[in-house]
Image (tube, rainbow, N blue to C red):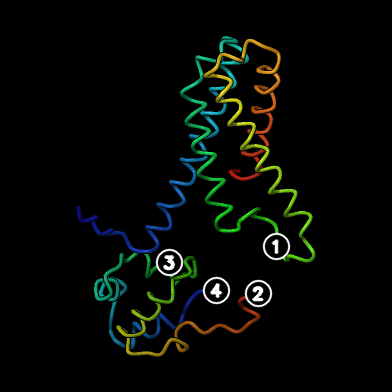
């Protein structure tokens, strides 16, 4: 999986650190770090929580083209 | 009694499941090895391994029934297509049922002291070989 730069950008736009985001949605900081690095594939529920916390849409943060998915 | 709600997040839950899976695999392989060593090397008396055999049988039965109920036959195989893979699926079902019957007869033979006889010994061997195949097929 590729790095999720959109998540990093969205966090920066909201002036939130990984820790802040993790605390606001009730998960560990490691999971946010793993998602950003592309090491963990979150469930749709967690994706939604992240989107609500960052005031973004699901496709803005997690959309990937089919080619990336195949890789 | 109210069940304690998990305080782990989903990644930790997934990791815990993986750890539990590895632990279960190690335990079951260890159990099978201990039965084999006790019976084949240390002693030929089957009564020594009745406890281990029953645990292994119950474990195998649970796994078998859970797999059948959920329609899971093989990790690497494609989803069953009734027309194309009917024969293959039937083969797996038959081998699973064969294991079940062998395990059951073996347990009965242990309890009924049949292991001293020729049929008991044959069933011992079938059970151990079939158990090995089963574990290689499903656990590893």
Indicate the position of residue B118 as horizontal and vertical percent values.
Answer: 71, 13
The 10 Å Cα crowd at callout 1, few under 14, some 14 to 19, many 20 or more, is: few
Q: Residue furthest front?
A: B112
Residue at image point 67% right, 23% down:
B123
Q: Which residue is mark 4?
A: A2
The chain that hosts pointer 2 is: A
Disc 4 to disc 2, C-alpha distance: 11 Å
Element type at mark 2: helix
Residue A49's spot in the image, x, y percent?
Answer: 33, 79
Say above or below: A71 vs B34: below
Mark closer to the observer (2, 1): 1
Query: Which residue position is annotated with label 3?
Result: A34
Which residue is under mark 2?
A: A70
Specify whether disc 4 shares its chain with disc 1. no
Residue B110: mark: none
Q: Nearer the viewer, residue A59 or A6?
A: A59
The mark closer to the camera, 3 or 2, is: 2
Callouts 2 and 1 in the same chain = no
> What distance separates the C-alpha of mark 3 from that of mark 1?
30 Å
Alpha carbons under labels 2 and 1: distance apart: 18 Å
Q: Residue A40's x, y, as percent?
A: 47, 66
Would you say B44 lies left or right of A41 here?
right
* Quadrant where the image shows the C terminus of chain B: top right
Q: Earlier in the sequence, mark 3 or mark 2?
A: 3
Query: Neighbour class for label 3 at 10 Å: few (<14), some, many (≥20)?
Result: some
């Amino acid at each position: 999986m590729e790095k999720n730069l959109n998540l990093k950008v969205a966090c920066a736009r909201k002036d939130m650190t990984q820790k802040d985001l993790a605390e606001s949605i009730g998960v560990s900081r490691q999971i946010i770090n793993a998602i950003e690095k592309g090491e963990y594939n979150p469930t749709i529920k967690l994706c939604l929580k992240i989107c609500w916390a960052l005031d973004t849409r699901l496709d803005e943060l997690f959309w990937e083209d089919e080619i990336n998915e195949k890789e | 009694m109210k069940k304690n709600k998990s305080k782990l997040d989903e990644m930790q839950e997934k990791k815990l499941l993986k750890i539990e899976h590895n632990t279960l695999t190690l335990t079951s392989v260890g159990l099978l090895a201990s039965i084999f060593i006790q019976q084949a090397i240390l002693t030929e008396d089957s009564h020594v391994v009745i406890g281990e055999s029953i645990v292994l049988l119950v474990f195998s039965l649970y796994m078998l029934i859970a797999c059948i109920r959920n329609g899971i036959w093989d990790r690497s195989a494609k989803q069953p297509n009734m027309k194309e893979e009917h024969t293959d699926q039937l083969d797996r079902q038959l081998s699973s049922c064969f294991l079940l019957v062998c395990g059951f007869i073996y347990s009965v033979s242990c309890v009924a002291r049949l292991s001293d006889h020729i049929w008991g010994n044959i069933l011992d061997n079938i059970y151990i070989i079939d158990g090995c195949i089963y574990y290689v097929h499903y656990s590893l």
